[in-house]
């Protein structure tokens, strides 16, 4: 597990479970992010892209800078704007397609 923790009164630890397509881009089973309080799921995705590079950003976001993946928080589907809390677990899954 990779830990990307900082020190500060105004931060919280968020665990990102690396699943599905992200596994080919991030070679860790999970990542701990140090995020500011009131950060959203979308903010955490942007932080992953900042840390791991453009390929991760392209996997998570479309050209309009909108998340194009399914967001999961504490094992439940949620919206990208949902605010995170200390020790939340999140993951990003590819959209379901088919016919």
Image (cartoon, rainbow, N blue to C red):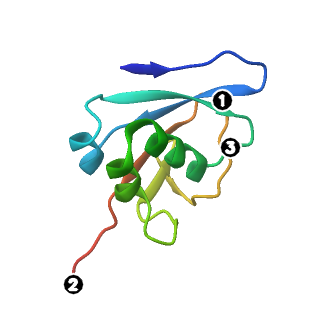
Residue indicated by mark 2 = 99
Q: In 3D space, how far apart are the residues under numbered discs 3 and 2 (Cα atoms)?
A: 35 Å
For this view, does 84 lie left or right of residue 93? right
For this view, does 64 lie left or right of residue 94? right
Q: Secondary structure at mark 3?
A: loop
Residue indicated by mark 1 = 86
Q: Position of residue 59 (x, y in %)?
A: 34, 56
Q: Which mark is residue 39?
A: 3
Q: Secondary structure at mark 1?
A: loop
Q: With respect to residue 13, does 64 lie above or below?
A: below
Q: Secondary structure at mark 2?
A: loop
Q: In 3D space, how far apart are the residues under numbered discs 2 and 1 (Cα atoms)?
A: 39 Å
Q: With respect to residue 8, does 93 lie above or below?
A: below
Q: In 3D space, how far apart are the residues under numbered discs 1 and 3 (Cα atoms)?
A: 10 Å
Q: Position of residue 75 (x, y in %)?
A: 46, 45
* Mark 2 or mark 1, earlier in chain: 1
The crowd level at tag 1 (other Cα within 10 Å; few <14, some 14-19, many 20+) is some
| On-image quarter of the N terminus | top left
Residue located at (48% from left, 62% from top): 67
* Mark 1 or mark 3, earlier in chain: 3
Q: Are the residues at dot 1 and dot 3 in contact (C-beta closer than 8 Å)?
A: no
Q: Position of residue 3 (x, y in %)?
A: 45, 19
Q: Which mark is residue 56?
A: none
For this view, does 83 lie left or right of residue 46? right
The crowd level at tag 2 (other Cα within 10 Å; few <14, some 14-19, many 20+) is few
The crowd level at tag 3 (other Cα within 10 Å; few <14, some 14-19, many 20+) is some
**For residue 49, which quarter of the picture?**
top left
| On-image quarter of the C terminus | bottom left
Q: Are the residues at dot 3 and dot 2 in contact (C-beta closer than 8 Å)?
A: no
Look at discs 3 and 2 and give the one toward the viewer. Answer: 3
């Amino acid at each position: 597990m990779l830990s990307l923790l900082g020190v500060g009164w105004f931060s919280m630890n968020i665990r990102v479970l690396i699943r599905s397509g992200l596994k080919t881009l991030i070679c860790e089973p999970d990542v701990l992010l140090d995020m500011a309080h009131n950060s959203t799921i979308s903010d955490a995705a942007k932080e992953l892209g900042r840390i791991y590079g453009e390929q991760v950003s392209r996997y998570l976001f479309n050209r309009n800078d909108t998340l194009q993946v399914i967001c999961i928080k504490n094992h439940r589907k949620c919206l990208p704007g949902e605010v995170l809390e200390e020790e939340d677990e999140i993951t990003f899954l590819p959209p379901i397609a088919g016919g």
